[in-house]
Image: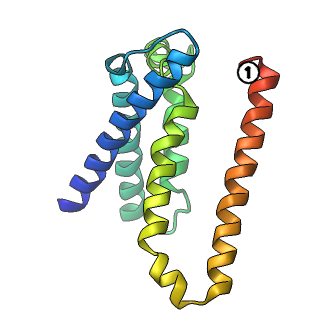
Amino acid sequence: MSKYYKYIKGWVMTAVLGSICNYIYSLKAKKPVLPWETIPGFLLFFLVMILAIMLTIYLKKHFPNHNFSTLGMVTLIGILLSLPGLSPVAGFVKASISKISLLPLCTPVLAYTGISAGKDLSTFRKQGLAIVVTTLVAFIGTYLGSAIIANITLKVMGVF
């Protein structure tokens, strides 16, 4: 039970931080979305994640040789719930999820990554300077590459 408690606690913390980041981001766009307006969207995210985990556990139990990941299940369930004409809740899903921007959700994820990397820094040092330099270059390259791609995409879309 404690494993699931940790999952739920992490999801709730991510939703709270994501709601705050989303609000700050929406102020910049001059269309403020208050944090509590994102609750239905985050509850849908939670529902999809829980369904995907349950389906993956079921498949592993009954079909041990299956090769479908939880992430694949999240994607499949999300698509099925949001397809107009196929899902009776597609309109509600679209309305709820559209209040949550993707970019602000990256903030908690990047914060968790930074905390995780900082926690394991002593292990990196024990492995030698080369691994530390390689890791730092990979982190910096990934961050800069993502920032450049996001900037180009936002400029093409006319957001910036």
Q: Position of residue 53 (x, y in %)?
A: 38, 50
Residue 63 visible (yes or no): no
Total labels: the figure holds: 1
Extreme residue toward the left, this view: 1
- Looking at the rendered image, the quarter that the C terminus falls into is top right
Residue 45 visible (yes or no): yes
Q: Residues within 10 Å of mark 1 (few under 14, many from 20)?
A: few
Q: Quadrant of residue 28?
A: top right
Q: Position of residue 109 (x, y in %)?
A: 48, 48
Q: Which residue is mark 1?
A: 160
Q: Position of residue 153 (x, y in %)?
A: 77, 30
Q: Position of residue 91 (x, y in %)?
A: 49, 11
Q: Is residue 48 above or below residue 125?
A: above
**Which secondary structure, mark 1?**
loop
Residue drawn at (77%, 20%), measured in percent from left and top? 157
Residue drawn at (48%, 76%), measured in percent from left and top? 121
Three-letter amino acid code of the residue under disc 1: Phe
Is 120 in front, or is 157?
Answer: 120
Residue drawn at (34%, 49%), measured in percent from left and top? 54
* Direction from residue 76 to residue 92 in the image, left or right: left
Q: Quadrant of residue 61?
A: bottom left
